[in-house]
Amino acid sequence: MKFSNQLVLWYLSNKRDLPWRATVNPYKIWLSEIILQQTRVDQGMSYYLKFIENFPTINELASASEEQVLKLWQGLGYYSRARNLHFSAKYIVYELNGEFPLTYNELIKLKGVGDYTASAIASICFNEATAVVDGNVYRVLSRYFGINTTINSTKGIKEFKQLAQQLLDSKNSGTHNQAVMEFGARMCKPQNPECETCPLSNSCVALDKKLIKELPVKEKKITIKKRYFNYLVIQTEDNRTKIVKRNKGIWINLYEFPLIETQSEIEENQLIEHEKFEELFENISTSIKLFNKDIIVHKLSHQHIYTKFWVVNTQSSEDFTLSWDTIRKYPVSSLIDNFINEYKTH
């Protein structure tokens, strides 16, 4: 209980003034937690405010089209979060009659909601005594108690969850959970933690044994895959182009220019000879220019995408009907968005 009390005292004096902390509305807490997965608070804030402005209640979110949701999410990455958010909003409104789940066991059934998010909502909104364990919590607990169990192993996940549950102040679970997460984000940081002013420094094992940089321990499992994208940016005589909706992968249902993916980097002559190019521009004259002189490397957590944007000037065609003036209405990846911004000002 001493551990919890010290963290809560620190939290009440030092917590950031964040909009989702001024409410226990489960819709708003859920929205904030989904946005903040894999996202820093300073980056996620504007997205949270945009979503609340456009979809002030879960009913408005459920009524929106997926395209509207993805457009608002544009630039935040990990788009499955947005698709799952929208799916679960519709499920709550249309299958649960708008009644938001009240318990951890019901919350975890929602698509896109795992142990951490279910625990956060249940404890903050309904004061259910269930501990949160995220990257911040792993770091605080592993350092404070000197635990070198691998945090992303089956054993580690179980061990840290049990420890977090034992430390939880069951009568004040929402505040306790927010305190330990805030403490990890602002005091016990991954790099250069604030050990000199830390209220737990007198009893921190990692600090005493000089293990701050070694803890927590995480297995490196990710193998980075290299992919080679060649986007065909069609520019017709009457200022038209073509974009298509992706039907698979991480950017599913986002829009992009016609894509030729290859096993390695290719040059113009190889592009022109590709069957997809020939199919798209059959019996149409074209001139091609590579827009980016240096290949663009778009880095995602599990893959690096080596990208070339080929501007294809061509004659008008009934296959190329999208006006460049309306292209910004469509949800696209940040890779495509960055290109459009540069191309339009070029």
Image (cartoon, rainbow, N blue to C red):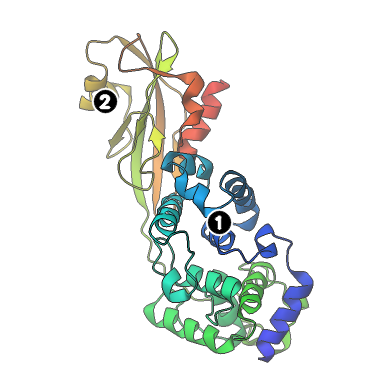
In the picture, residue 265 is in which quadrant? top left
Earlier in the chain: of badge 1 and badge 2, it is 1
**Does the image show residue 134?**
no
Residue type indicated by callout 1: Thr
Q: Quadrant of the C terminus?
A: top right
According to the image, label 2 marks what residue?
A: 270
Q: Residue 63: x percent and y percent?
A: 46, 45
Q: SS class of the residue under badge 2?
A: helix
Q: How many marks?
A: 2
In the picture, residue 11 is in which quadrant? bottom right
Residue plotted at (29% across, 9% down): 285
Residue plotted at (66% across, 85% down): 4
Looking at the image, is 131 positioned above or below residue 340?
below
Question: Please, which residue is most extreme toward the front here?
Answer: 97
| Residue 39: mark | 1
Give the label, 1 or 2, closer to the camera.
Answer: 1
Residue plotted at (35% across, 9% down): 316
**Does the image show residue 163?**
yes
Residue type indicated by callout 2: Gln
Q: Residue 238: x percent and y percent?
A: 43, 9
Residue plotted at (47% across, 59% down): 98
Label 1: few (<14), some (14–19) or many (≥20) C-alpha neighbours in 10 Å: some
State left or right for residue 23 relative to residue 86.
right
State left or right for residue 21 relative to residue 302.
right
Q: Residue 113: x percent and y percent?
A: 44, 65
Asked if the residue at tag 2 contacts the one at tag 1, i.e. Cβ–Cβ closer than 8 Å, the answer is no
Q: Residue 180: x percent and y percent?
A: 63, 76
